[in-house]
Amino acid sequence: MSEIKNKTISGVFWSATENFTNLGIQFIIGVIIARLVSPKEFGLIGMITIFIAISQTFIDSGFVSALVRKQDVTRTDYSTAFYYNLAVGTVFYLGLFFSAHAISRFFDEPQLTSLIRVLGLGLIIGALCIVQNAVLLRRVDFKLFAKIKISSVIISGSIAIYLAYKGFGVWSLVARQLLDGFLTSLFLWIWNKFIPSLVFSIQSFRELFGYGSKLLASGLIHSIFENIYLVVIGRYFSASELGYYTRANSFYRLPSHSITNVITRVAFPVLAQMQDNPVALKSGYKRMIKTTMFLSFSLLIGMAAVSSPLILTLIGEQWKPSIIFLQLLCFVGMLYPLHALNLNLLNVLGRSDLFLKLEVFKKMMAIPVVVIGVSMGIKAMIFGMWIASFIAYYLNSYYSGRFINYPMREQLYDIMPSFLIAIFMGVLVYFSGMFLPLGNSMKLILQITIGAAFVLTFSELFKLEAYLYVKLLVKNKLTTMLNGRK
């Protein structure tokens, strides 16, 4: 068990390092580019997002999860998955290439034709490194992945900023995505040193696809309904309004999705090793829930409270309509890590069939939300997303209660202290901003300082378990790193 604990600590540290550094750098790059590129041009990329996301889901087909979960993976398994991913990536790129004109007519944006045909090349590039990712996940080697992603983001982002400065507009955004994917793939092939064999096994394919097909279906449904809001805004409103929404979306995703990615990427391979020990599985899972939601509540509620000076300081007055979208989206994203962890448990237990059924049922709730958006506007649509998020959590938590005896009532009891501290912090920070006679940048710095001090002080005062665990993880990892340098 100590080996699993060490893998968990190391995995969380390096996964967190990669995610927060990667997203932090991307955030800074996005802020700089947002000052050089118009909201409409961001909106054009947003219109393409759903088509890229759906294609990527088919290319992966759940093979990464299948490879990570399988106890004894062979080179034949890896090679089979690799050639399948590459073949599907090529097919979907060709599909996008020939349908690009029809998509541009749908949105009434002629420029989309060339954008789709160039940006779609990222599908083939991404297919080349899917199996490489699975190899690293099985080893829980997030240290190497951190080096690769951070290097790729810095190089691609720097080039994109230069292009935006030189007036390339939307093409700087395209270059950023393509270069990031290309460099990630290149570095994985150089540093990971995994080379597929010239073999494709039908038996291996059937085994991997048997598990992954259900994840493919659920992933497809997730991709469609996760991005359907971009289609609705782009089709029924304008590229500029979609740009405001996508900027707000990228801000709130920084804490929400980065926390989720850190925890779930480490949780799946680590918890998979505990799947035959229900007591250890529940204990590890419970700790992940508490820790994740402590971070999620603090960061998302805090971001909602400082959204106005945050937007105005970082990307300027032209993005002011994004403020209300960001405030609402923060409350939608607050429970996102909790959804992901509950669904992750089903994958650990091998119940991809239930994963699929849950995804189908939950995503159907997006239909009335879309109708609300078309008839009542973007803000009403986000409020509908917030209600749907609570219903989805109820459904997700039912099965974790059933399989490992950790019902929603117990989960809520565990995360309530973190929520109360975060909500009081949010109220204090928000109202302090209203009465501070300062400029936006100074107000932002002071509000963040007040919020951080409040959370740390009261978490320490009440000995909040989740806070103490995070503190211990950081302390242990820093001690190990410092001792290693001596």
Image (cartoon, grey):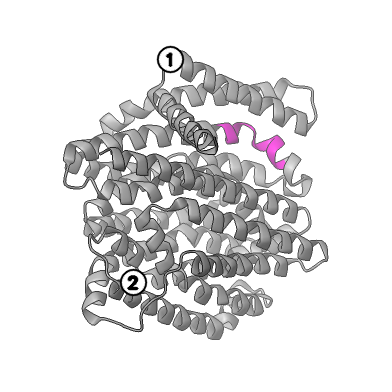
| Mark 2 and mark 1: Cα distance apart in space | 49 Å
Q: Which mark is residue 462?
A: 1
The answer to whether residue 387 of the structure is visible from this angle is no
Magenta span: helix, strand or loop, mainly? Answer: helix
Magenta region includes residue 306: yes
Q: Is residue 442 visible?
A: yes
Report whether 407 appears left or right of 57. left
Horizontal and vertical percent position of residue 194: 42, 70
The circle drawn on residue 78 is: 2
Badge 2 amino acid: Tyr
Q: Residue furthest top?
A: 461
Instruction: Kindly identify the amino acid type of the residue bearing the numbered disc 1.
Output: Phe
Disc 2 element: helix
Q: Secondary structure at mark 1?
A: loop
Q: Which residues are magenta?
A: 302-311
Query: Is 436 left or right of 78, judged from the image as shown?
Result: right
What crowding class fits label 2: few (fewer than 14 Cα within 10 Å), some (14-19), or many (20 or more)?
A: many
